[in-house]
Amino acid sequence: MLSSMDKWQRAIDLMTGLLGATAGYVVEYNDKLGFRAALTSQNDANPNRKLSGKCEPATSNIYCRRVAQTKASFYEPDATGKPEWADNPELTEDGYVSYYGVPLFWPNGVVFGTLCVFDTKPTGYDKRQLELLECFRDLIEADLRLYEQYQIMRNISMSDPLTGLNNRAGFEMLAHQKIRIAKRYHHNIGIIFIDLDDMKHWNDDYGHAAGDAALRAVGKAITESIREVDICGRMGGDEFAVLGYVRNRGDLTTIIARVRNALANAKLSVPKAKTPIRETPEISSGASVFFDPVNQSLEDMIAVTDLEMYRDKKRRRK
């Protein structure tokens, strides 16, 4: 999106200059968080060239609210003295008496926000000037379509289709991000490796559909047991991994205990199983903590934790 934002900035500056407006904006909209200026024109007349990041409540009586509610373009040439705008902070505080905005939509029809211009003096835009904003709107919406398609393809390439978790590539990408943050803010990194016990038994005795069901059950148990800030993924075959910031090993053993408890209560329904399933999946696990300062590579941390998991598996077979 960074390259798109640069392009949008040039469009806003050009749009504002061609209309002779005081300021131009791309405003993001969220029905819970409200309105937030994402980009603003950098012309000398604009008093707010630096974005504050502040959100205006969705209930605030601002001009963009009319656009978001109606999902249609809105032009106010002169709001001076009009009762409907008496409590509009853009008018009463910023002195913007003129506004023209067009809605920006995601490809699914949800409002992304608005593309708009403000002026401290009344305006009389003609039809061609109003169409100018619609032309810039089309350019921005084309970028939103490309961005959504990129996100879809990225999710497909980074997700495991069987369990819905991150695949190995997705897990490692997120893990590298977590490690960079851990080094910056002096966090300890904890990693868990989990392996479904006796995968061959599930496939041979109950059928491959049952083996898949067991893997999905493990994935679901992990998802329900980790914290919101943790990441997890299926590393391939019957192996899973979890990574997060921890205080000590106890944080990891708590997660593992939750996973085991969730699996003990799992109910597998496999209509095409060779024989009725009267057991639940069991796992082997390994856990390692890497204390600040974290100097190991992700590959080394995974190798250490993987070895811990195989030691647990060996103990469980005795």
Image (tube, rainbow, N blue to C red):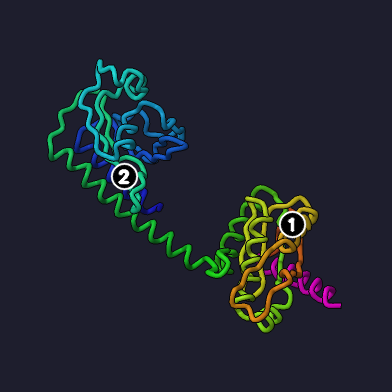
Label 1 element class: helix
Say few, some or many: other residues with alpha carbon within 10 Å of mark 1 (under 14 / 14 to 19 / 20 or more).
Answer: some
Q: Residue at x 83, y 77 (%)?
A: 317
Judging depth in this view, the residue of 210 and 121 nearest the camera is: 210
Quadrant in the rendering for residue 240: bottom right
* Disc 1: which residue: 258
State yes or no: residue 214 in magenta: no
Q: Amino acid at mark 1?
A: Arg
- Whether 309 is drawn above or below 130: the answer is below
- Whether 203 is drawn above or below 215: the answer is below
Q: What are the residue bounds of the magenta stretch? A: 298-318
Judging depth in this view, the residue of 85 and 281 nearest the camera is: 281
Q: Residue at x 40, y 52 (%)?
A: 2
Say few, some or many: other residues with alpha carbon within 10 Å of mark 2 (under 14 / 14 to 19 / 20 or more).
Answer: many
> What is the x, y in percent for residue 203?
65, 81
Relative placement, left or right, of 276 versus 15 is right
- Mark 2 or mark 1: which comes first in sequence? 2
- Whether 140 is drawn above or below 259: the answer is above
> What is the x, y in percent for residue 214?
65, 71
Which residue in the rendered view is the most extreme toward the right?
Answer: 318
* Disc 2: which residue: 104
